[in-house]
Amino acid sequence: MRAASAHLTRQFGKFLVVGASNTVLSFVVYATIVALGVPYVAAGAAGFAAGAVNGYVLNRRWTFRRVDSTGARVRYLAVQAAGLASTSALLWLLAAPERLGSLGGYVVTVPVVTVAMFVANRNWTFGPAPAPMSPRGEVTFR
């Protein structure tokens, strides 16, 4: 049980590191494109896309150690879209001045959405690790 808990904690830590790298990359792409004269809305979309691609590649290879597939790519995009929608919806609910305000709403929203996206990516996008196979092609049980 402790090994499973430690593995989950390491995975979540890696997920957070990847998320931080996505944020930095998104900002750099956004700032660079805006400096080149591209409208900020288009630059924002490009920055978001760069962070999402980075997140898919690093989470697939490093965090969850899975092979690439079209299905995983589609599921990852769905999780990204759900994360964006959830962030927007929670901010709309929480950030009103009579509630938590814009900063307070964001402080509450980000951890909730981050954990939800980790769970979705771990359990759905990249799924559980396949059972190991013996040299003769038989499935072995752990």
Image (cartoon, rainbow, N blue to C red):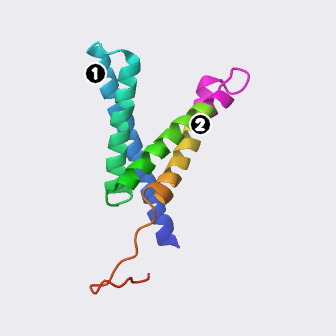
Assign a secondary structure to mark 2. Answer: helix
Q: Please tell me which of labels 1 and 2 falls first in the chain.
A: 1
Residue at which label 1 appears: 32
Amino acid beneath label 1: Thr
Amino acid beneath label 2: Thr
| In magenta stretch: residue 80 | no
Residue 57: x %, y % from top left: 32, 48
Assign a secondary structure to mark 1. Answer: helix
Residue 125: x %, y % from top left: 45, 54
Q: Which mark is residue 54?
A: none
Q: Which residue is more in the foreground, 138 or 103?
A: 138
Residue at point 28%, 21% (across, down): 32
Residue at which label 2 appears: 109
Residue at point 55%, 38% (across, down): 110
Magenta part, dominant SS: helix
Range shown magenta: 90-106
Residue 128 visible in the picture: yes
Residue 109: x %, y % from top left: 59, 36
Q: Which residue is more in the foreground, 85 or 24?
A: 85
- Which image quarter is the C terminus in? bottom left
Residue 24 visible in the picture: no
Q: In the picture provided, is 141 more to the left or to the right than 100?
A: left
Note whether 58 is above or below 127 in the view shown: above
| In magenta stretch: residue 96 | yes
Badge 1: residue crowd in 10 Å (few <14, some 14–19, many ≥20): some
